[in-house]
Image: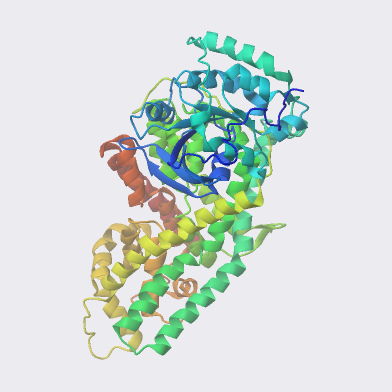
Amino acid sequence: MPAEVGSLPDTDPDPGPGVSAPATTLRLGLLGSPNSGKTTLFNALTGLHAKVGNYPGVTVERREGIANLEGREAVILDLPGAYSLEPLSPDEAVVNGVLDGELTERPDALLMVADACSLERSLPFIGQVLRRGFPTCLVVTMVDELEARQGRLDLARLEQALGIPVRGVVGHRGRGLDELQLLLRTPESWPLPVLPPPEDPIERVGWADSVLSTCLIQSPGPNQLTSRIDRVLLHPVAGTALFGVVMVGFFQLIFAWAQPAMEFIEVVMAKASNFVHTTLPAGLLAEFLADGLIAGVGSVVIFLPQIVLLFSALYLLEDLGYMARAAFLIDRLMGRIGLEGRAFVSLLSSYACAVPGIMATRTIPSTRNRLVTMLVAPLMTCTARLPVYALLIGAFVPAQHVWGPIGLQGLVLLGLYLGGGTAALLIAALLKKTLIRGDELPFYMELPSYRVPTLKLWLSQVWESAFAFLKRAGTIILLMSMVLWVALTFPRTPPPPGLDAAEADRYALEHSFAGRMGHAIEPVIAPLGFDWKIGVGLLASLAAREVIVSTLAQIYAASDEGSSLTQAIREDRNPDTGKPVFTPASVASLLVFFVFALQCVSTLAVLRRETASWRWPIFAFGYLLVLAYGASFVTYRTVHYLTAT
């Protein structure tokens, strides 16, 4: 009987008992088209332990992982997803560079990955790879879905037609992995591929059809569940409406579910600060630990539950296959402004952080479209803005329901996200019509079937992002907290006689290095409704947006011990006028400022690297600063007028 999907061909390259495999470390290149299951296979082989870096001299990210193949170690090099060895985008060009040994050490063998349900789309690419002459094996993924859709694929015939080993796996469930690991131990024993004769694209398609005719016994039927869901989700009206419902629920979730955990962390941080003050003798050390490190870092860590919920929802929607549909829906709108669906995918990545969003533009073939997308990516609301938004919304927006379970705080947060996204699209359209004109290229993206991710994969994705947030808090935020504590503490200017304790603390703060800087820029930011304290926070947040939270935490910890940051900013009064520092107008102005301003050194650095010039990072910083100042000024004046009348 022929070996069909899920079974192994009769031939097995395992050297057998008593024969030891070579001891040298292997380098195995893993390549395939997007949505083929390549990353899932990479994670399954390496146990989710990946090393991320860049190819020398090329700003395209690479991932390497170590796989233990039954006693033999192998470095799995996960190459960027590609459809062809005739590249259209920078990440596809990397595949050729790796195979040629120009960017890194050449792999010893290749693992081609192809989706069992769409093998016809992968075979022309497979033919190109086989012509390179590497020892190669083909891993056919998603064989469970092929069986569920009544498809039948003869792996033995496919192996014979290609002249290379072929295995079927279900990566996220571990099916077929043991057999694959045995195969990967000894690529030295694999037969060299039969080189396909055609080089012309049309001839490659003909060759692929001939291979498919020998091994595909029965074509898979359509995925009925996916088809039924897509009829709704991809509908121009119903799909768009459901997208809006998903987004509203998404932001309601962030506030509604995170609050208990945030309150718990806040209590823990307050107790830690009190413990330091009561245990250590009064002095600089106690102030540094309690008001500098704990107040600075703790004020940001408090927002970890919201970060976890944000990434939990994002990864779930992405792994289910919904985000690809969202890109399809938005493609028509993107086309009207001169961009395409791939730009939307990059902008969507920027909701986590602008740095990976900018790096994701490497999939965009058009150089000009890629540049426009990079220049507007910082407008997408990244997680660094979330602590700022959450602090101000939690302190000044009432936690009341507007309609049913829909709360006002979640709607305000959604409005800030939509404001950034809308501004990104409008500015992209303006840039495409003025500074950066260019021709359009066709947009092609596969819509994967809906799949429920495994709990292990989902949790690992959330943990990696949460750990990155904590790492940022333990490095950038920690360093800035230490620097800010010094700037807020020194020089220790003696207060004039006759001041009470609170007035003496305020005097010391205003005459510290940080206070003097804040007062120096106060005339510039006063039209926006900001005082010197907010000015210090804005200066500090140039390193990272969320640093303004730790800055305010240190300022108010030094001047108003014992109160939470939320309570402190609510109760802060101008000592000269007695009026609140944070008014509805100034809070709205500050929120709008953070919607637009590019306050992130890491983003500027990656823009410099991706564009190979300081011209565009400086342009991005400048135009966004002007936009932020202008929008904040208008917001402050408008809200101030409305509240005054």
What's the image's color scheme?
Answer: rainbow
Identify which residue is drawn at 70% across, 19% down: 216
Do we see residue 573 in this rendering? no
In the rendered view, tell whether residue 190 sits above or below residue 390.
Answer: above
**Would residue 263 be found to the left or right of residue 227 on screen?**
left
Do we see residue 586 in this rendering? yes
**Would residue 19 be found to the left or right of residue 630 on screen?**
right
Residue 537 drawn at (x, y percent)? 35, 63
Residue in front for this viewpoint, 56 or 595: 56
Residue 471 drawn at (x, y percent)? 43, 60
Quarter of the picture holding the N terminus: top right
Identify which residue is drawn at 62% across, 34% down: 325
In the rendered view, tell whether residue 61 sits above or below residue 203.
Answer: below
**Would residue 262 be found to the left or right of residue 145 on screen?**
left
The picture quadrant where one finds residue 274 is bottom left
Identify which residue is drawn at 42% across, 89% down: 278
Residue 225 drawn at (x, y percent)? 76, 34
In the rendered view, tell whether residue 116 sits above or below residue 591.
Answer: above
Residue 44 drawn at (x, y percent)? 58, 44
Residue in front for this viewpoint, 286 or 380: 286
